[in-house]
């Protein structure tokens, strides 16, 4: 009995409930930061209390009957597999709220968004803590409706269709998952994951295990997503608002892969052994498909979304090898992908906010000159994502490939060598598309085939998504490539308090007037760096990023570097847990 | 020897339907003799409400008392051809856990329907100055009480005659209730459709019942069971009888292929009647079907279970597919409740393997369904009072205009879809999935999984509409102060309890 896991689930839930109080509703984002901050502190406390000497065992357990009629117990706990994901979830949610504080949602209604994100956090953390199959399922489902609303209410132009596609796809997955979980219950007679994992599948017939693994694996594969069940993902990621994309890529996908590590592989080892070649095949197909699709994308967010398909392919390949090395790699890649892709989506959101579009052709080149901070951070995140040694993205994929190099005893080695080769080709393609993107967007000369008009002063605050879209389309339609609408002045305005914004606007207007005569001179100076930008920059120390953005991004950058240079920080926690999950029977 | 000729009646056992019957008579008398005052309809509504609460109290007392009460018994020496003195008496009216659960559901639903009726009748009075659009309150509440009396009687019935009579007592007043909004063409059409469908289904049921009686020589369910266990030579006639009886009940629960009346009738009927049809009528139909299949025909489970599985799969699929394209709220709920019938039916298909779990799962789902569906109908009634309120477009931005109503409806819809935060719906789905998976019907579980997704499509579209920005100039709010507002509050409270502690339902139904 420990109160920490319960508090991790209860605090965001209570926070969501209290958000309905009118006094809180007016300061919803501050409240969201406070609640998610408390959750983050709790998560860090969990990591501190966690007995690092024995990460293989389940710790800080709470086990209470909830619904005896279903055999459902409120059983929470944490071990080396779930701990990093819990901390990752708490961190990313907190950073999303920090980002939200500086960047009110385009669809308005920040209070509703705060409630939605807090409920989302309940589901995400609960999924990683649950130790009862049905409880896992309940938390797994909790995220669906909030994420649907995040996309459908605060998303981009095609949000309605994307949201419906997301929820229908993932619900189909979870319905199949439920069938699989119930098959396990029928066969094994218990829902307790610890007991089930301890048995390593003994007492369940091989055919039943294969059936259950198929159902559970399909359900999880939709969420992960595994090619060819990934088609919901690009739309959902592209249309979701920045915080939605970050949580979707950073945490929600991990719920699927976590399910493989927690349920499918340890509980059903024979089923896993029988179906691992298929899992591996689909995984490498996903790697190849994801990277090829990325090469063909024009939209920055869509490209990052497809890159997730590829990266999650590595995670699945690691699982498919059924070796401690492969599983370790999968779990590492999981966390690394959460950090890196979270950062990438933050940056893509920032780019979209400034340019009004995320279309790479229209962005033109030379971002490093126009927006040096964002440009260099984007370069960093891309390089991390393509797996540069020394950054977090490298270790997971390398270990996954290493796992495929010497798969578990029962698996066909030549087949997995082929998988490894395809996966290796995938890393090359990944490097190709990221570098291609960088060369198009961040580097190169600033393309100026249209006159760079005066910087738009930040318009009146737009309350609805439609309003924002109109503004964006006005800013975007005519120009190709477009100018960043907010290099300096608008960023400054975003950054400042409401009252100060008036001053900024006045200065921007003044800059406009001054520029009227000197447009040519300003253009000669180059990439839309106008007086207004100078005015804005003079007041803020952070160039083209806001304080909130920097606060949201820097922790991710630091962790990417940390885990890249010191992978043992993570591997020390997961390795013993992975070995105990696989048991002695399967590990080579 | 008098005991054999004159039945002794245990009035405590029949108290609940008796109270309702008396209230029905009382309402009619009050309507006739009370001076016609503006608040008269309200008084009648409150009297009916009081009667329902009293009947609920009786049910509660019987439940707390535990045990099984029997009455209208026929000793074994009478009736059966070979006199078996050792055999126990067969009773026509048995109060056991099953009948108490169904009675409680029906009565609680009845309370909600009465609250909705009070709003509906008041609205009719406000709207039309003349007599034309007014609903006669006395008749309305009389018919409602009569229906509910039948619905309470039905789950306790243990012979075919009682079953058919109480089923008719449930059905007949509903035709009149549907048509009671006189001069409304759609209501009359709906009533006529309902009447024709119902009469045909009764005829079919009666034909099946007569065949069953012919085969077994008895009308009591337990004796039919005993006879079917021994007699083996009339299998084909028995099969025909089973098909006919089940088909008759399939009409009542709107199962495929006897579902087509649901859309028009729900839409044409006043909304409280639609709620009545979707919960009370349906619960009675299921109670009758479950009694017949499990008390009289358990030995023939191998015969009827596959049929039930196919019908369940078709019913949920047809209901969901039809609901997807609807533009009118009540019509959507009509088809969705057809789909939900399919889910309730599904666990019965594994009766042969897991008899107790199958019935328990069906009843549990029925209870969850009743609570969440009634929220939806209550909010729909409130919104329908707005002009153009029947169309789904009227719900755009409801959660922003009228947060209480909008959020309640959103909760009901996610419950019906079976997703958190509607945990009641999620657990209901888990219960039936568990029964079906335990029973080994994998294909049915897959069909159910696909249907859950299909159902989500229209539930979530409706829910999203509630939160979408309202159309320009749309700022109408719904009044939740009416009696229907109380109904919303009560049903939401019950559903929230079911969500947090579903064990409440599972322990009584299992």
Image: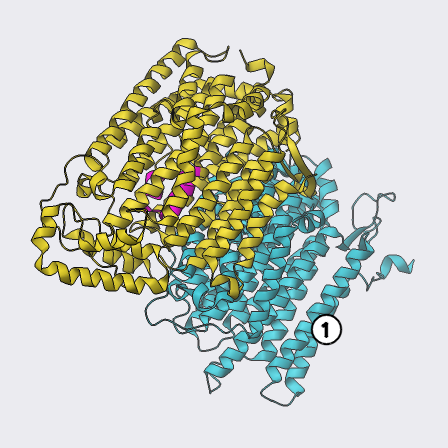
Chain colours: A yellow, B cyan
The C terminus of chain B lies in quadrant: top right
Of B43 and A432, which appears nearest the observer?
Answer: A432
Q: With A28 as the anchor, is B242 left or right in this view?
A: right
Q: Position of residue A91 (x, y in %)?
A: 48, 41
For residue B293, above or below residue A113: above
For residue A67, above or below residue A509: above
Q: Position of residue A336 (x, y in %)?
A: 42, 30
Residue drawn at (50%, 26%), measured in percent from left and top?
A570
| Numbered marks: total | 1
Magenta stretch: includes residue A522: no
Q: Position of residue A31 (x, y in %)?
A: 50, 56
Residue drawn at (28%, 57%), measured in percent from left and top?
A468
Q: In terms of secondary structure, where does tag 1 sit?
A: helix
Q: Position of residue B294 (x, y in %)?
A: 67, 44
The N terminus of chain B lies in quadrant: bottom right
Residue drawn at (54%, 41%), measured in percent from left and top?
A125
- The stretch in magenta equals A233-250
Of B153 and A274, which appears nearest the observer?
Answer: A274
- Label 1 marks a residue whose chain is B
Residue most toward the front? A538
**Which is the main secondary structure of the residues drawn in magenta?**
helix
- Residue located beneath label 1 in the image: B22
Q: Residues within 10 Å of mark 1 (few under 14, many from 20)?
A: some
Of A74 and B344, which appears nearest the observer?
Answer: A74
> Would residue A391 be seen by someone viewing this image from the given angle?
yes
For residue B64, above or below residue A295: below
For residue A189, above or below residue B140: above
Magenta stretch: includes residue A236: yes
> Would residue B157 be seen by someone viewing this image from the given angle?
no
């Amino acid at each position: 009995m420990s109160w920490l896991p319960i508090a991790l689930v209860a605090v965001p839930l209570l926070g969501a409930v209290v958000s309905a109080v009118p006094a809180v509703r007016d300061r919803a984002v501050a409240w969201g930061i406070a609640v998610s901050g408390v959750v983050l502190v709790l998560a860090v406390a969990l990591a501190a209390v966690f007995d690092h000497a024995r990460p293989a065992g389940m710790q800080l357990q709470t086990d209470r009957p909830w619904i005896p009629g279903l055999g459902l117990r409120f059983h929470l706990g944490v071990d080396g597999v779930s701990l990093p994901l819990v901390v990752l979830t708490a961190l990313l949610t907190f950073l999303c709220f920090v980002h939200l504080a500086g960047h009110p949602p385009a669809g308005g209604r920040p209070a509703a968004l705060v409630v939605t994100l807090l409920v989302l956090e309940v589901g995400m953390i609960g999924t990683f803590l649950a130790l009862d199959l049905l409880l896992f399922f309940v938390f797994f489902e909790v995220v669906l409706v909030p994420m649907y609303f995040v996309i459908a209410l605060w998303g981009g132009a095609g949000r309605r269709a994307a949201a419906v596609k997301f929820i229908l796809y993932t619900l189909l997955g979870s319905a199949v998952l439920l069938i699989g979980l119930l098959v396990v219950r029928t066969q094994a007679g218990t829902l307790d994951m610890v007991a089930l994992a301890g048995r390593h599948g003994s007492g369940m017939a091989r055919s039943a295990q294969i059936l259950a693994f198929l159902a559970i694996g399909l359900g999880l594969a939709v969420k992960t997503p595994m090619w060819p069940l990934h088609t919901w993902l690009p739309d959902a990621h592209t249309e979701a608002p920045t915080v939605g994309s970050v949580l979707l890529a950073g945490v929600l996908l991990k719920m699927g892969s976590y399910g493989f590590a927690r349920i499918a592989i340890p509980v059903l080892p024979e089923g896993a052994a029988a179906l691992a070649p298929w899992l591996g095949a689909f995984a490498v197909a996903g790697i190849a498909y994801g990277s090829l699709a990325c090469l063909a994308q024009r939209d920055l967010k869509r490209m990052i979304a497809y890159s997730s398909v590829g990266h999650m392919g590595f995670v699945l390949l690691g699982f498919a090898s059924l070796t401690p090395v492969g599983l370790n790699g999968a779990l590492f890649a999981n966390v690394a992908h959460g950090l890196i892709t979270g950062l990438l989506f933050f940056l893509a959101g920032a780019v979209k906010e400034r340019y009004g579009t995320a279309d790479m052709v229209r962005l033109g080149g030379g971002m490093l000159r126009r927006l040096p901070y964002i440009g260099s951070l984007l370069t960093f995140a891309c390089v991390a994502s393509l797996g540069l040694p020394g950054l977090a993205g490298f270790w997971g994929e390398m270990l996954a490939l290493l796992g495929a190099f010497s798969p578990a005893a029962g698996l066909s080695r030549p087949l997995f060598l082929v998988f490894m080769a395809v996966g290796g080709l995938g890393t090359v393609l990944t490097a190709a598309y990221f570098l291609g993107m960088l060369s198009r967007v961040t580097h190169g000369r600033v393309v100026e085939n249209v006159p760079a008009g005066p910087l738009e002063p930040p318009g009146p605050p737009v309350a609805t998504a439609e309003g924002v879209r109109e503004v964006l389309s006005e800013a975007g339609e005519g120009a190709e490539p477009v100018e960043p609408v907010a290099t300096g002045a608008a960023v400054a305005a975003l950054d400042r308090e409401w009252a100060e914004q008036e001053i900024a606007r006045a200065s921007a207007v003044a800059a406009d007037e001054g520029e009227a005569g000197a447009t040519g001179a300003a253009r000669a100076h180059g990439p839309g760096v106008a007086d207004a930008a100078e005015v804005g920059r003079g007041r803020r120390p952070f160039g083209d990023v806001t304080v909130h953005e920097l606060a949201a991004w820097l922790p991710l950058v630091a962790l990417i570097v940390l885990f890249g240079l010191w992978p043992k920080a993570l591997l020390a926690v997961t390795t013993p847990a992975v070995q105990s999950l696989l048991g002695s029977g399967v590990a080579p | 020897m008098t005991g054999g000729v004159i039945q002794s009646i245990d009035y405590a056992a029949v108290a609940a339907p008796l109270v309702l019957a008396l209230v029905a008579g009382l309402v009619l008398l009050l309507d006739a003799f009370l001076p016609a005052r503006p608040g008269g309809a309200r008084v009648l509504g409150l009297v009916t409400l009081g009667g329902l609460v009293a009947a609920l109290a009786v049910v509660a007392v019987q439940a707390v008392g535990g045990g099984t009460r029997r009455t209208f018994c026929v000793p074994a020496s009478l009736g059966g051809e070979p006199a078996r003195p050792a055999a126990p008496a067969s009773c026509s009216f048995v109060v056991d856990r099953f009948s108490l659960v169904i009675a409680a559901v029906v009565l609680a639903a009845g309370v909600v329907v009465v609250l909705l009726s009070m709003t509906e009748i008041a609205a009719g009075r406000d709207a039309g100055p003349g007599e034309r659009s007014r609903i006669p309150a006395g008749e309305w509440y009389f018919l409602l009480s009569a229906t509910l009396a039948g619905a309470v009687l039905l789950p306790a019935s243990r012979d075919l005659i009682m079953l058919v009579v109480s089923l008719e007592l449930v059905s007949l007043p509903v035709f009149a209730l549907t048509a009671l909004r006189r001069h409304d063409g759609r209501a009359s059409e709906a009533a006529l459709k309902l009447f024709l469908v119902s009469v045909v289904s009764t005829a079919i049921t009666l034909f099946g019942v007569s065949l069953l009686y012919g085969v077994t020589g008895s009308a009591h369910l337990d004796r039919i069971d005993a006879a079917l266990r021994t007699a083996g030579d009339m299998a084909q006639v028995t099969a025909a009888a089973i098909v006919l009886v089940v088909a008759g009940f399939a009409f009542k629960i709107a199962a495929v292929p006897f579902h087509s009346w649901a859309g028009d009738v729900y839409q044409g009927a006043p909304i409280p009647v639609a709620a009545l049809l979707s919960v009370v009528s349906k619960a009675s139909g299921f109670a009758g079907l479950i009694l017949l299949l499990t008390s009289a025909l358990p030995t023939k489970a191998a015969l009827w279970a596959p049929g039930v599985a196919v019908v369940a799969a078709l019913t949920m699929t047809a209901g969901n597919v039809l609901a997807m394209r609807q533009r009118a709220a009540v019509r959507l709920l009509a088809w969705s409740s057809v789909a939900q019938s399919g889910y309730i039916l599904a666990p019965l298909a594994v009766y042969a393997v897991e008899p107790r779990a199958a019935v328990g799962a069906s009843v549990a789902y029925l209870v969850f369904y009743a609570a969440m569906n009634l929220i939806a109908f209550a909010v729909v009634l409130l919104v329908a009072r707005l002009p153009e309120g029947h169309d789904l477009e009227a719900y755009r931005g409801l959660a922003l205009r009228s947060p209480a109503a909008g959020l309640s409806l959103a909760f009901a819809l996610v419950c019906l879809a079976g997703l958190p935060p509607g945990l009641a719906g999620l657990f209901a789905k888990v219960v039936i999935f568990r029964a079906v998976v335990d029973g080994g019907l994998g294909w049915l579980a897959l069909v159910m999984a696909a249907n859950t997704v299909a159902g989500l499509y229209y539930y979530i579209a409706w829910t999203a509409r509630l939160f979408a920005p309202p159309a320009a100039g749309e700022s109408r709010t719904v009044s939740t102060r009416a009696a229907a507002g109380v109904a919303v509050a009560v049903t939401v409270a019950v559903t929230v309890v079911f969500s947090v502690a579903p064990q409440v339902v599972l322990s009584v139904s299992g």
